[in-house]
Structures are given as C-alpha cells and as structure tokens.
C-alpha cells in the first residue's frame, strides 16, 4: 500500500510469485513504490525481505546530502535534525551520518573522521558527545551507545595541517561506507555528511582555493552525493550551484538565529572534555529535586568508566607520525637536496629519542592489516581503521618503558598506532 501526493491511499495489488521467479518494476521521477512480503520467502538483490514489513523504493532516493557552511553556522545541528527525522518516520530507516570535521571528532575523539549507521534518535546531552556515544567508549545501556562507527585518524583539528592526508582519509571512509551500504534498509535510508568550516571558505582556514575545492570534490565522489545543503552562506551557495548545479540540487538553508559563536579557547576546553569523557565516561547529575530525569530520553545510569593504566615496553607498540611533523624543514636540508619523505608517508617514532613529543600524546590504535593482503606498502597504515584511542601518560627512557591509559584492557604487543598533534593530561 502506498500514498499518492494528496495523501490518500494509492491502489495496491497482490502478486503471487512462483519459485525462482522475479518481480520487476520501473518508476517515473518523483514516484515511489512500497513492497510487502505477505507470506513465503523473497529477497532483493540477495537481501532477504522480512515478512509483513514494507520496503519503499523511489526514483529519487536515497538522499545523500553534503552539508556545507561557515564556522558557527549550525551545520552539525542540521545534520542531527535530518537524521533524527529520518529515524522517527517509522520505516525502520537507519541513515548513515558521516562526520569529516576533525575539529568535531564525531563518535571518537578530536582529530578523527567517522561514520555510523543511526537506527535510534541521537541523544544530545553533553558537548562531549554531540552525536551520541559509541560502544567502543561507553556501556551499551543506552541504545545510542550501541553505535559502531567506522573511524580514521587524521590527528589534527584543522584540514590545513595536511590536506592530502585529509583527502585520502575521506576517500577511504567513503569506500568503507560503500562496502557496508548493501542492505535494503541502508540503501533506502540515505546518508548525510557533516563538514568542517574550512570547506566553506579559504578565509582564515589556511587552505588554498584548489585544496578546498579538492576536498569538497572528494566528499562528493566518495559518498556519491546527490544534494548539497549550504547553511547561511550566499556566496558558497552560488559557487556550488555553478560547479555542481547541473548534476544535483543545491539548496540554501538559513542560519539559525540560535547559533552561538564559539571561540578557540572554548573549543580547546571541549576537546579536553571529550578526551576525558572517552576515558572516564559521562556522568551528569540532574538538578536538585529532579527525580525522573533522563539522559537523551533514556533513564540515567552510571556511565562512569574505569580506564586501564598499564606499563609497556617501547618495543611493544609501533608508533608512527605522518606529515609535516615528521619531516625536516626545507631550510634545514643541504643545498640542492630534496625531501625523501612525502606528506603522507608514515615515519616511525622512537620514544627514547629527545623531541619525540610523545608525553601526553593521543594515539590512535589501528586495526591489524587485512590477512588476505600479502603485499605490504609504505602507506598501508593510512588505510587502516581505528579501533580505539590511547594516551601516553609517562615515559621511562632509561628502562625503555611507557605508561599507557586506555578505556579498555588488552595487550598492545605487536600493535600499531599513529600520533597526531593532540595532547591530553588529567591536570
């Protein structure tokens, strides 16, 4: 059963399919069709249909939106509202929310870009986790904590630190999302991409114009974007219409009057708060006299974590640094010499050497290399997803040992991690 544009019930028809036969249909632009299995077994491109559940198909679906806008324009709020609207439609949709703003951190920590399939409304209760909590860093008592995001580690707050690395990680994330975007619910639910303010303008962002355009194009290509939403920026709207208007809709959204201007010092405090919450969990005491308070619409429970502090050998964990930080400045090279390290080549860091800058450094712990790939390559670790985050709280150089703080227990022997520019301490 489907609905026509006037909201009245559209005609329905029952089809009885013999075994090993197909039901095929074509749709005109702007139309939709709902298919429901009443009995038996059937599948759509290999995905089994659930009996009694309606599956919606349309000529223009799914929406895959890229949200652009300047700093403090409310882009993340727009993304959350759209995702929550999709979730509450009652169609069992699970839209994919993508965060490529390393200043935000998504479900991980600042410096990461990530994506997650959202099946329940995003609980917003603290700036420490504006997109809800992930299962990797919080108990799964709340449904929002059951999110299993994909994450890659960029390691810095601003895209200007290494635009080439940012470009590569966006494409990696897009490919990984595409590989997982095969279920009927995911195909129908769509995707929304939140972006950093640097994508809106070169003013104050440190990006060159060609770098900014390249990063936007990376998002468009990686996530198969079919609509661009521009928040509160007339010039950017015109620019996107000129470049992409022939391929997709470009829609301007007015900037909310409730948007608050956030300065750099506030963002730095939030970064510290996010890292503390990742390690120790989130606990919000309700106001005095409030007995039936909820956290994001769910009962408040004790979300306190007990992170593990362990001492390991320097040789247990391989730590790499990527980009400008790992290269000598051009002025320090001999006359006529050129760098032998590219902006994306990982360079191993020796914790025993002075200037390692590892004390209080935030590390991204990487997943192991894929066992089916026998060939190793120099930049392989850039293509590995993140499984967790660590902080080096102490270095014992004479004994070649370091103390690691982690929200989860487990051996780190033989593992690989990347260090960025983020530091955190409990003081």
Image (cartoon, rainbow, N blue to C red):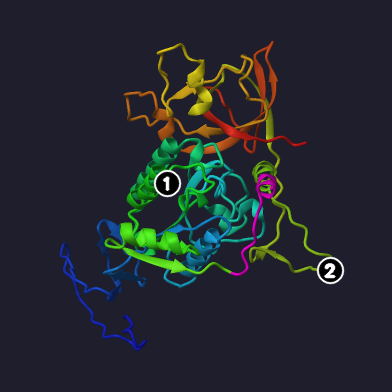
User: x%, y% of residue 182?
Assistant: 33, 54
The residue under the point 34% across, 47% down is 179
Query: In this orientation, which residue lies closer to the viewer: 9 or 37?
Result: 9
Residue 51: quadrant of the picture: bottom left
* Disc 1 packing (10 Å; few <14; some 14–19; many ≥20): many
Does 380 appear above or below 217?
above
* Disc 2 packing (10 Å; few <14; some 14–19; many ≥20): few
The residue under the point 32% across, 24% down is 374
Q: Secondary structure at mark 2?
A: loop
Name the residue that disc number 1 marks.
212
User: x%, y% of residue 195?
Assistant: 48, 52
Query: In this orientation, which residue lies closer to the viewer: 267 or 209?
Result: 209
Count the marks.
2
Residue 29: quadrant of the picture: bottom left
Quadrant occupied by the C terminus: top right
Specify whether residue 148 is in view: no
Say whether residue 258 is magenta. Answer: yes
Query: In this orientation, which residue lies closer to the viewer: 241 or 192?
Result: 241
Does 376 appear above or below 36?
above
Image depth: mark 2 or mark 1 in front: 1
Say whether residue 13 is magenta. Answer: no
User: x%, y% of residue 153?
Assistant: 50, 38
Quadrant occupied by the N terminus: bottom left
Q: Which label was assigned to residue 289?
A: 2
The residue under the point 65% across, 14% down is 400
- Residue 402 in the figure: left or right of residue 43: right
Instruction: Report the span colored magenta.
Output: 257-269
Distance from the alpha carbon under mark 2 to that under mark 1: 51 Å
């Amino acid at each position: 059963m489907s609905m026509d544009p006037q909201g009245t019930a559209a005609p329905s028809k029952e089809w009885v399919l013999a075994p090993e036969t197909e039901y095929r249909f074509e749709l005109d632009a702007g139309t939709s069709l709902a298919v429901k299995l009443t009995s038996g077994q059937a599948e759509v491109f290999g995905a089994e249909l659930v009996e009694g559940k309606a599956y919606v198909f349309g000529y223009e679906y799914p929406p895959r939106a890229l949200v652009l806008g300047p700093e403090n324009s409310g882009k993340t709020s727009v993304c959350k509202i759209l995702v929550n609207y999709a979730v509450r439609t009652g169609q069992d949709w699970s839209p994919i929310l993508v965060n490529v703003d390393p200043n935000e951190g998504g479900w991980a920590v600042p410096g990461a870009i990530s994506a997650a399939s959202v099946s329940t409304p995003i609980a917003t209760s603290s700036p420490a986790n504006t997109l809800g909590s992930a299962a990797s860093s919080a108990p799964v008592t709340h449904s929002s904590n059951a999110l299993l995001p994909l994450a890659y580690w960029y390691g810095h707050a601003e895209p200007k630190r290494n635009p080439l690395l940012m470009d590569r990680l966006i494409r990696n994330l897009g490919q990984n999302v595409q590989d997982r975007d095969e279920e009927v619910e995911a195909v129908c639910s769509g995707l929304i991409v939140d972006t950093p303010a640097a994508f809106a303008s070169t003013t104050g962002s440190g990006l060159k114009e060609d770098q900014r355009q390249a990063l936007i194009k990376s998002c468009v290509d990686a996530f198969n974007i079919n609509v661009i939403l521009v928040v509160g920026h007339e010039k950017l709207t015109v620019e996107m219409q000129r470049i992409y208007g022939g391929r997709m809709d470009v829609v301007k959204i007015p900037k909310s009057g409730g948007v608050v201007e956030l300065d750099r010092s506030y963002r730095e405090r939030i970064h510290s708060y996010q890292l503390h919450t990742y390690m120790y969990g989130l606990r919000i005491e309700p106001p005095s006299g409030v007995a039936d308070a909820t956290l994001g619409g769910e009962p408040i429970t004790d979300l306190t974590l007990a992170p593990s502090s362990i001492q390991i050998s320097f040789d247990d964990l391989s730590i790499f640094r990527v980009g400008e930080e790992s290269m000598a400045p051009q002025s320090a090279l001999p006359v006529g010499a050129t760098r032998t390290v590219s902006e994306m080549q990982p360079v191993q860091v020796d914790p025993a050497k002075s200037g390692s800058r590892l004390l209080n450094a935030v590390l991204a712990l990487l997943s192991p290399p894929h066992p089916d790939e026998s060939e190793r390559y120099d930049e392989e670790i850039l293509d590995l997803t993140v499984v967790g985050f660590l902080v080096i709280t102490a270095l014992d150089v004479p004994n070649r040992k370091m103390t690691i703080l982690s929200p989860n227990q487990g051996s780190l022997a033989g593992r690989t991690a990347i260090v960025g520019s983020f530091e955190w301490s409990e003081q």
